[in-house]
Image (cartoon, rainbow, N blue to C red):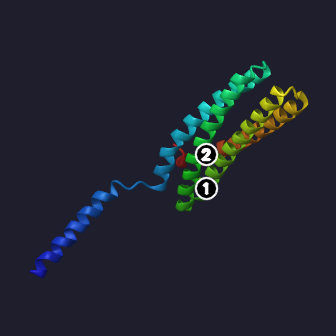
Amino acid sequence: MKNKILPLFLIIIIVFTIAMSGCIQSNADNINGLSSTINDTLEKGDTSYNKAVLETNKYLLDNASSDSNNALSEFETAKSSAQQALNYAQSSNDSVLITYMQNTVGEIDSRINATLQLQQAITSFEQKDSVGGNSHVLLANQFMDQSTQYKSKNDIIVKQNPSKFK
């Protein structure tokens, strides 16, 4: 009886393993799955941020505050997904993916910092402190410049490694 159960048990384990292997995604697949979420939330965040900047320039501070809150929320969602993707990249031990995702997290952190500075500027302008407001606007611009530098680094990585980025 034992002789019949053991081979049957091994066949069941092999079939189960083969079936499950189709359900298991690689780290690269997981990163690719998160990339659309990251891109979508960054796009929405950028739209809200840019609206907030224009509204701040026009002293439509209530609208600017609302849009900057939306931007911050989108950027934080993007960061969460990017951090997850970075964890997958680190698990893969692929230095290209790790560097790319580190740059992406840095890019998003810079956008978050820019948004926080914009919010401080809005608060300063609401308090009729134009010197403080302009100081925060300058910092927000610096963080956005830093964000574009991270993006440029990633563009170079993609150009140098086209097979890794589809």
Check whether the beta carbons of the residues at disc 2 and disc 1 lie within 8 A of each other.
no
Give SS at disc 1.
helix
In the displayed structure, does residue 113 sit left or right of residue 6? right
Looking at the image, which is closer to me, 42 or 162?
Answer: 42
Q: Which residue does the numbered mark 2 point to in the structure image?
A: 79
Callout 2 amino acid = Lys
Residue 87: x, y in percent? 56, 57
Q: Which residue does the numbered mark 1 point to in the structure image?
A: 98
Residue lying farthest right? 131
Give SS at disc 2.
helix
Q: Is residue 10 above or below residue 43?
A: below
Q: Quadrant of residue 118?
A: top right
- Image quadrant containing the N terminus: bottom left
Rate crowding at label 1 as few (under 14), some (14 to 19) or many (20 or more) other CA atoms within 10 Å.
some
Rate crowding at label 2 as few (under 14), some (14 to 19) or many (20 or more) other CA atoms within 10 Å.
many
In the displayed structure, does residue 63 sit left or right of residue 82? right
In the displayed structure, does residue 165 sit left or right of residue 102? left
